[in-house]
Structure formats: structure tokens, C-alpha cells
Image (spheres, rainbow, N blue to C red):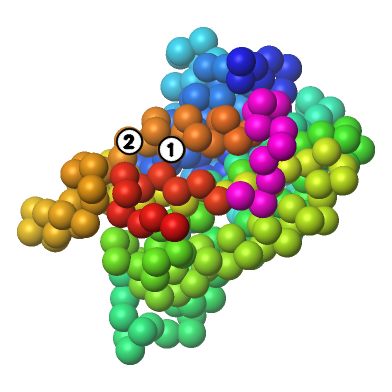
């Protein structure tokens, strides 16, 4: 089950040790995939590649600015030249900002959308041709509980809006690409035990935990497990779906 031997998996934003991306990449590597560590942080890329190879996995690092089409296209070309295939794309890269609408600037909104939505679009668009030619592909994008319930944990209204946009984009995309053997789904993490969570003042942290029926933050591995399943051959009849991973803080 969940066998990825021979498959090539891109995980954007996986160079940071602070978020979910590194755990996602390592989990795919543990299932036999060759993982492409795609990030703007070159030092972080090497750290992740070194970590994955140290645990016996296969990883290839490539610097990319997902907000620039030429950079994304070059990444895809380099992967195709090296491996001749792209089986899975995980749109993990994202940014956030805690700011009120009253204090928000237009540049703030543009910066958040450039990464969370427009960068996701560029990466997705770039992998469609090789996936269509292969008649197979899996795309999993990270949205957020904030995109469904309107914030309440991290980030401002622009972050929530960008993550809601990911959901609508993915559902429409599913209608377009399903005939080609490609599925696309989203996961919506709630509060996850990352460095951002650990940096919260105790009073603020306690308030967030009070709103989670399970009484704790999620672990990055719990998010990664769901993503790997959605990217597997076993999830062949699931597309256009959004999976909540939030300990019950939002139910629909």
C-alpha cells in the first residue's frame, strides 16, 4: 500500500525546517519516492536533502521562486531532463501575516496572494503537460482551516482569502483534468505543532487550544500522512475534495 517506488514527487516550500514541508518530503521518501525539494531558500534545500539522504531516502534539490513563471518553468524542465517524469506535485509553499484589514496595505495582499495562490497556479500549470502525456498525476494543495472558517488562528483576512481561493481553484481544476487520469485535492490543516505555534504567548495558545475538541495541536506527521494518501494510487477515485485536519476545530 502507498507505494511510490520510481515516482518523482515535487514538494514546494520543503526547504524550511519550521513548517510542514520537510515532514511531507521525508514521508514520501520513506515510501520510495524520489523527492524534489523545491524552495527559494537554498541553504534550507540542502538541509532537507541531507536529512532525507541520511535516513536512506532519495532527494534532489532545486531552487525556485514560485511567483516567477520562468523560474517555475525552469524547475519543471530540469526535473524532466533529469528524471523524465513528474508524478506528484504538492503545493505546500505559503506565507502568512498577522494584520487587521484596517492596517493592511495593497502590497500586503499582493504578497500573500503571489505565493499562496498565484505561485500555486504557476506550479500546477507547469506540471500539467507532463502529467497529461503520462496519463497520470496527483496534485495536492495545502489550503487551511482559515480559508473555510475565516481565520481565528494565524494570519489576516488576506491569508484566509488566499486559502479559500485555493479551494475554488482546485475544484474547478478537478473538472478539467480528471479525464487525463490526474486528480487534485486539498488538505486544510488547523493548528499544527510548528515553530509558529511554539512562538505564541501562553495566553494566546491556551485560547486556541480551548477551541479544539481534541485539546491539542496536530503534528506535522499527521498532515503528511493524509497528503501521502491523497497522492497515492489508492486514492484513485478521490478528486476535487478538501480534507480537514484540525482536531475538530472546524466541522462541515
Residue 150 can be seen in this image: yes
Left or right side of 32 for 45: left
Residue 146 lies in the magenta stretch: no
Q: Residue at x 56, y 30 (%)?
A: 228
For label 2, the residue is 219
Query: Do the residues under discs 1 and 2 have CB atoms within 8 angstroms?
Result: yes
Residue 200 vertical position relative to residue 10 in the rendered view, above or below: below
Residue 33 vertical position relative to residue 115 in the rendered view, above or below: above
Task: State which region is magenta.
Answer: 232-241
For label 1, the residue is 223
Image spot of residue 157 (x, y percent): 40, 75
Identity of the residue furthest to the left in this view: 203
Using the rendered view, name the quadrant where residue 47 is placed.
top left
Identify the image quadrant of the C terminus. bottom left
Q: Residue at x 23, y 42 (%)?
A: 214
Left or right side of 107 for 191: left
Q: Residue at x 51, y 46 (%)?
A: 243
Q: Classify mark 2: helix, strand or loop.
A: loop
Identity of the residue furthest to the bottom in this view: 102
Q: Whole-Å distance between the Cαs marked 1 and 2?
A: 7 Å
Identify the image quadrant of the N terminus. top right
Using the rendered view, name the quadrant where residue 22 is placed.
top left
Please name the predominant secondary structure of the magenta segment in the image.
loop
Left or right side of 3 for 204: left
Identity of the residue furthest to the right in this view: 133
Image spot of residue 239 (x, y percent): 69, 46
Image spot of residue 38 (x, y percent): 59, 40
Amino acid at each position: 500500500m502507498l507505494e511510490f517506488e520510481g515516482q518523482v514527487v515535487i514538494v514546494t516550500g520543503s526547504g524550511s525546517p519550521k513548517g510542514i514541508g520537510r515532514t511531507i518530503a521525508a514521508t514520501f521518501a520513506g515510501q520510495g519516492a524520489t523527492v524534489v525539494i523545491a524552495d527559494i531558500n537554498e541553504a534550507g534545500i540542502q538541509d532537507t536533502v541531507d536529512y532525507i539522504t541520511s535516513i536512506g531516502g532519495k532527494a534532489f534539490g532545486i531552487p525556485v521562486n514560485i511567483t516567477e513563471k520562468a523560474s517555475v518553468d525552469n524547475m519543471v524542465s530540469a526535473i524532466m531532463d533529469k528524471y523524465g517524469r513528474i508524478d506528484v506535485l504538492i503545493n505546500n509553499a505559503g506565507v502568512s501575516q498577522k494584520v487587521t484589514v484596517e492596517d493592511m496595505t495593497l502590497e500586503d495582499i499582493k504578497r500573500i496572494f503571489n505565493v499562496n495562490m498565484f505561485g500555486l497556479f504557476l506550479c500546477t500549470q507547469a506540471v500539467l503537460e507532463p502529467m497529461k502525456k503520462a496519463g497520470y498525476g496527483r496534485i495536492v494543495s495545502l489550503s487551511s482551516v482559515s480559508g473555510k472558517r475565516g481565520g481565528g488562528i494565524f494570519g489576516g483576512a488576506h491569508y484566509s482569502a488566499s486559502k479559500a481561493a485555493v479551494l475554488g481553484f482546485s475544484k474547478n481544476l478537478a473538472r478539467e483534468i480528471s479525464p487525463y487520469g490526474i486528480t487534485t485535492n486539498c488538505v486544510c490543516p488547523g493548528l499544527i505543532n510548528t515553530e509558529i505555534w511554539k512562538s505564541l504567548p501562553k495566553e494566546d495558545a491556551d485560547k486556541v487550544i480551548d477551541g479544539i475538541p481534541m485539546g491539542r495541536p496536530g503534528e506535522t506527521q499527521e498532515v503528511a500522512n493524509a497528503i501521502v494518501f491523497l497522492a497515492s494510487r489508492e486514492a484513485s477515485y478521490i478528486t476535487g475534495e478538501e480534507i480537514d485536519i484540525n482536531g475538530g476545530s472546524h466541522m462541515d
